[in-house]
Image (cartoon, helix red, strand yellow):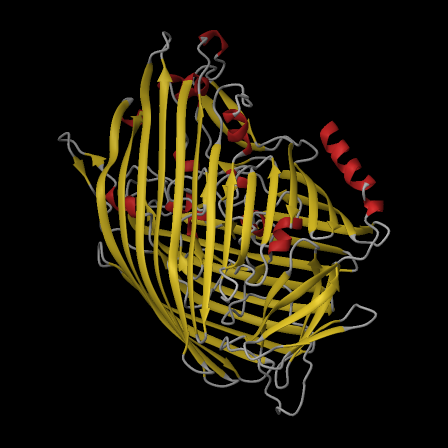
Amino acid sequence: MRFIFVFFLALLLTTAANAQGLNQTIRGRILDRESQQPLVGATVVVLDLATPLAATADATGTFKLEKVPVGRHTLKVSFIGYEEQTIPELLLGSGKELVLNLGLTESFTSLTEVTVTGEREKGTARNEMATVSARSISVEESKRYAASLSDPARTAQTLAGVSGTSSGDLNNEIVVRGNSPRGLLWRIEGVEAPNPNHFSDAGASGGAVSVLSTNVLSNSDFFTAAFPAEYGNALSGVFDVKLRTGNNEKREYAFQAGVLGVEAAAEGPLSARSKGSYLLNYRYSSLALLNNLGLDVTGNGGVPKYQDLAFKLNLPLGRHNLVLWGIGGLSSSSSRATRDSSQWERYYERFDDRSSSDVAVGGLTYTHSLNDHAYIETALTASGDRHAYQAYELSESYNRVLDTEQRYENTALRASVLYNHKINAHHTVRTGAVLSRLGFTADNGFRDDDYGGQYVQFLQGTGHATTTQLYSQWKYRATEQLTFTSGVHFLHFSLNGNAAVEPRAGARWAFAPRQSLSAGVGLHSRLEAPFSYYTRVPNTTGGYTEPNRNLGLARAVHYVLSYDNQLREDLRLRVEPYYQYLYNVAISPDRASTFAALNYGGGAPSEALVARGLGQNYGLDVTLEKFFTSQNYFQLTGSLYDSRYRAIDGKWRNTRYNGNFVANALGGREFKVGRANNNLVGLNLRLLWAGGNRYTPIDLAASRQAGYGVTLEDEAWSEQGPSYFRLDVRASYRKNRPHASHIISLDLQNATNNQNIFGRFYDRYSQQLETSYQTSLVPFLNYRVEF
């Protein structure tokens, strides 16, 4: 804390020395939103200056505004025959140029007129086929929100209908409207990708630290229901991540160091004559770095280590564009039990364990503009993820006995093609195909209490399969106020021949100048993790069977309505009721078991499964959001929901993720400081209140007799902990100097140190029911420089 105080004081004291006005460049491209063709002659105006600055797009749609004062600015983008767009409060710093890719929608009016239809709604999804339950998450929001830690997944947890408390405070797992987080689809650069998080479990969708750095990210789309037909193999939601293109005119750099890691980024033109660019980012764990310097910062010899690398090379060639990109991350952690049994107070304290998770994905994307109305995009990608875990129990003489050993390796080779054709201002069609070759190698064994404590190898072997996905969708703008979308997605899984045809439809009606109604319906399906199909179950002859080879696809039907009211230019109200019906859910065929895939977030099942379960989620999401204007913003979200499932016994029960409610209150304000008002002080808060975690009651008497925890299976997930409460605080200071910006920030997660209950378990040592808690107050200090 002394260091933090001294650092802030030093920066504030130097503010007076930087009194001169500082300028920077805003530039980018202006395109037709549907056809992605340049709009030659489109204009961009900076509205909030005493002397307005303006620029016109050239033959490639490129514009440049030079010598713009640093700070926040509002831009107006217009072009004859297109709907005008206003972009408020863009942050411009002295260290980096602001490069924008802007899309305008064609108007139905005569080309001799300019029709202003109002500001484009903030947070509108980049995907023009989206009509409902879709939102764009900006890089600035990921940086600004309290305790978001520049992580887009943690930013998504602030949205209505989304929670992450069930997985722990230090996990960015995304639970959408009561669904299992395993139902989320990650896409990077338009293709399906493995879970892009450090310290993740096999088959999960979250982790402790994101592999995705905001240094390389552009705005990304997040869908919570009834997503467009191009998205397949997704049950609950879609996170469609885009990487930004590096600066192709000027070399720029960034460096930052903090609790989470030490990070460096570089970007610039490939050569003086080339219009191409490169973007490169590398990060290394701060704790691992200190450990390498000889400092034991954990006290038990176990240091969480991780590093990640991301790059993007962009090469435009007239009507052609070639992109080579990649993201990869390595992470591991371990813990070592104290070699003094008198200090063991809980059973888990006598274990040594080590875990690791690695992920990589990359590809080559080629885009060809066929004409002024159509383009084709092809991509070849490769990805892989690897997860390992070992746990050893120590005997009284400190000999190690293997308790659990898991190893999962997944690979995927994909080829995809997309054809987009804007027929006219009314009609746009998009169709495509994705062929994936999946492979895996897995081992999973542990001492199972149900088999007398014997070590059982539930999974061992390799396998491969192919998935084929085809889709087609159509957008019809009947009028400027009425839009329809429709489409169909087809998914085929070669391992067992299961297939799904998934129709989708949506509509949006702007029935008043500031109000609209939207609706969406869609059928969606998702594969289980590939290794789930190869689970081995011991039989009575001493061998194994593989009962899950023919497991069907999990299916869900989404229905959603949405009411939007733009109460004023910077204030929006959104209300969304929804209903989801799930079927073909993987459950246990054993009538004594209540297992269902809807209740676990990762790992491999160790029992036989059949696709005969049901589920349903319904609720109401409400958002009141004031956009960032006049140096302040706020966002209030509330969700009431119910999430239930039906196992083989026909009884409906709460799912593990049925918290029943979640509410967020976010807000912040910026203050201009310095003699020339060049610098910014930011204060941001987030208040989270949610229903407590659910867990299955434990039979204490039976547990004491058995020597391990025995749950009351018929009452699965019936108990719920107290409501979860957390306050996060963020303070930041941005100092703009000639050619460089310095940013120091402090995030306090759980600033009130509230003791939120994570769950309850039976401890073999105490022979009592014990309570585990979520994380207490955690500070995250970070320093960043852009130049």
Rendering coords of residue 450 (x, y %): 30, 27
Rendering coords of residue 265 (x, y %): 55, 48
397 and 323: which one is in front?
323
Rendering coords of residue 650 (x, y %): 36, 48
417 and 230: which one is in front?
417
Say which quadrant the N terminus sits in: top right
The part of the image, by quadrant, that contains residue 512 is bottom right
Which residue appears farthest toward the front when viewing the image?
272
**Quick check: 184 above or below 8?**
below
Please name the residue shown 56% across and 23% down the image.
297
389 and 599: which one is in front?
389
The part of the image, by quadrant, that contains residue 574 is bottom right
Left/right placement of residue 126 relative to residue 548 reads right
**Quick check: 199 above or below 145?**
above
Number of numbered discs overlaid on the protein picture? 0
Left/right placement of residue 754 relative to residue 130 reads right
205 and 726: which one is in front?
205
Q: Is residue 642 visible?
A: yes
Left/right placement of residue 114 relative to residue 361 reads right
Rendering coords of residue 740 (x, y %): 69, 50
The part of the image, by quadrant, that contains residue 693 is top right
Which residue appears farthest toward the left when viewing the image?
541
Q: Is residue 709 visible?
A: no
**Quick check: 258 above or below 59?**
above
